[in-house]
Image (spheres, grey):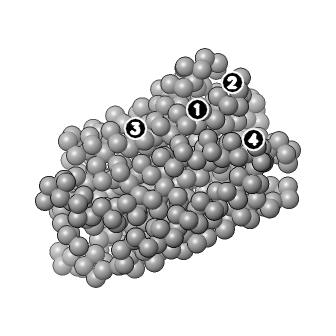
């Protein structure tokens, strides 16, 4: 089946998955930093303590693999429904916070526990089941969702905060999420026996056997590379606006830079997805995932040049976008469809663990130096090491492609 044929046949589930991912927990990486300066200022939280809140991503280390396993067992629609309901409710609760940082941590824990069912770990299965010849392009469309919604919502939420306050902005966000949840739930296809069954060739050696996975060299390469490349997530998840304001640019320019970051993410999704369908996956992964190191080095240099800061944010966003395509593609390519969400859950858990590690390192560095620069330099070096770690996948075994027309 040709690329246009696959899109014509499967446009509805792909659109539903893209919207679900766009308005799911992945959106947090684009909007948390919009609220961060307001919360820190109003409640007199220290930047170091606020940086530690990113450590709640450690909860996802346990919850995301569970969400992935449940998706392989029951399908995307029932699992995603949990997060579609809970996610907007958490923002209603956050709009009523009284000032304790523990309240903020509580809602973050709920999001990391129940709303991980709206992440790429779950929705990527829609693409894995339905696309073969242009799977990279389909993943690019899917993973563009959060970046696009982040680029659109960041200026809107910043405007609402300026005009009406952060509490109203949280409530507006909850309404938008509720509306999108109804659309996604209606469009997602119900689970089918064809998509959930295990191919006969895999019977007796299912990769859901975690003892088998532990012995997989390919999985360890992907996990270690994903961990190293994801250490900057602690900065991107909630600290970008604070870091940008520290450079001396205005609040309006900082908000615009968040949109530049999101735009870079969209470019990374599209270009990487298309490249994965044309070039060796290990080379695409290594090149695409090395790009943010340049952005981190620029931002860590202490420059106050708006064009240079914009370039750094664009490069950082590019690789954040490429990450979603690269990791999902490699998992499907090397492990097949039947357990894609289970293994993606493990990979995403490694990313969450990197976020926790990075958050702890960032907090320590902020307390010691009062600056983000050292963290960005160290993270840039780690990203380069992680990007080069993908190269040994050139001779890793591949799973046999399975086409589905359902």
Q: Which residue is mark 4?
A: 162
Residue farthest along the front direction in this orientation: 163
Give the CA distance from mark 4 to mark 3.
29 Å
Secondary structure, mark 2, is loop
Q: Which residue is mark 1?
A: 257
Q: Which residue is mark 2?
A: 249
Query: Considering only order in the chain, which callout, 4 or 1, is on the residue closer to the N terminus?
Result: 4
Residue farthest along the left direction in this orientation: 1
Is 403 rendered above or below residue 270?
Answer: below
Q: Which residue is mark 3?
A: 267
Query: Considering only order in the chain, which callout, 3 or 1, is on the residue closer to the N terminus?
Result: 1
Give the CA distance from mark 4 to mark 2.
17 Å
Secondary structure, mark 1, is helix
Residue sitting nearer the eye, 85 or 347: 85
Query: Considering only order in the chain, which callout, 2 or 1, is on the residue closer to the N terminus?
Result: 2
Quarter placement of the N terminus = bottom left
Contact check, label 1 and label 2, Cβ < 8 Å: yes
Q: Is residue 314 left or right of residue 96?
A: left
Q: Quadrant of residue 302?
A: top right
> Between tags 4 and 2, which lies in front?
4
């Amino acid at each position: 089946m040709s690329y246009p044929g696959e899109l014509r046949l499967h446009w509805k589930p792909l659109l539903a998955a893209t919207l679900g991912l766009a308005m799911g927990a992945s959106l947090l990486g684009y909007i948390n930093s919009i609220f961060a300066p307001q919360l820190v200022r109003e409640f007199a939280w220290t930047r170091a303590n606020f940086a530690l809140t990113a450590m709640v991503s450690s909860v996802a280390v346990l919850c995301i693999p569970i969400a992935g396993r449940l998706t392989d067992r029951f399908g995307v629609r029932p699992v995603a429904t949990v997060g579609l309901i809970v996610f907007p409710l958490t923002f209603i609760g956050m709009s009523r916070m009284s000032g304790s940082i523990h309240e903020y941590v509580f809602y973050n824990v709920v999001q990391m526990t129940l709303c991980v069912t709206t992440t790429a770990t779950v929705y990527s299965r829609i693409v894995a089941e339905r696309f073969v010849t242009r799977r990279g392009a389909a993943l690019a469309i899917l993973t563009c969702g959060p970046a696009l919604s982040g680029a659109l919502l960041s200026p809107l939420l910043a405007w609402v905060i300026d005009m009406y306050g952060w509490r109203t902005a949280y409530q507006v966000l909850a309404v938008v999420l509720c509306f999108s949840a109804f659309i996604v739930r209606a469009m997602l296809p119900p689970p089918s026996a064809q998509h959930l069954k295990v191919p006969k060739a895999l019977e007796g050696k299912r990769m859901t056997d975690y003892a088998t996975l532990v012995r997989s060299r390919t999985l360890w390469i992907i996990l270690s590379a994903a961990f190293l490349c994801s250490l900057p997530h602690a900065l991107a998840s909630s600290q970008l606006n604070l870091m940008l304001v520290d450079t001396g640019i205005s609040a309006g320019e900082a908000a615009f830079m968040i949109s530049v970051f999101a735009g870079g993410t969209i470019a990374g999704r599209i270009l990487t997805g298309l490249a994965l369908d044309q070039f060796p996956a290990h080379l695409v992964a290594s090149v695409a995932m090395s790009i943010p190191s340049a952005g981190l080095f620029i931002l860590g240099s202490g420059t106050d040049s708006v064009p240079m800061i914009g370039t750094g944010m664009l490069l950082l966003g590019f690789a954040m976008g490429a990450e979603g395509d690269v990791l999902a593609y490699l998992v499907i390519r090397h492990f097949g469809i039947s357990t894609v969400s289970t293994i993606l859950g493990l990979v995403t858990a490694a990313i969450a663990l990197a976020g926790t590690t990075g958050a702890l390192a960032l907090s320590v560095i902020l307390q010691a130096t009062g600056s983000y620069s050292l963290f960005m330099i160290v993270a840039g070096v780690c990203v380069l090491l992680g990007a080069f770690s993908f190269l040994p996948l050139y001779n890793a075994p591949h799973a046999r492609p399975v086409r589905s027309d359902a």
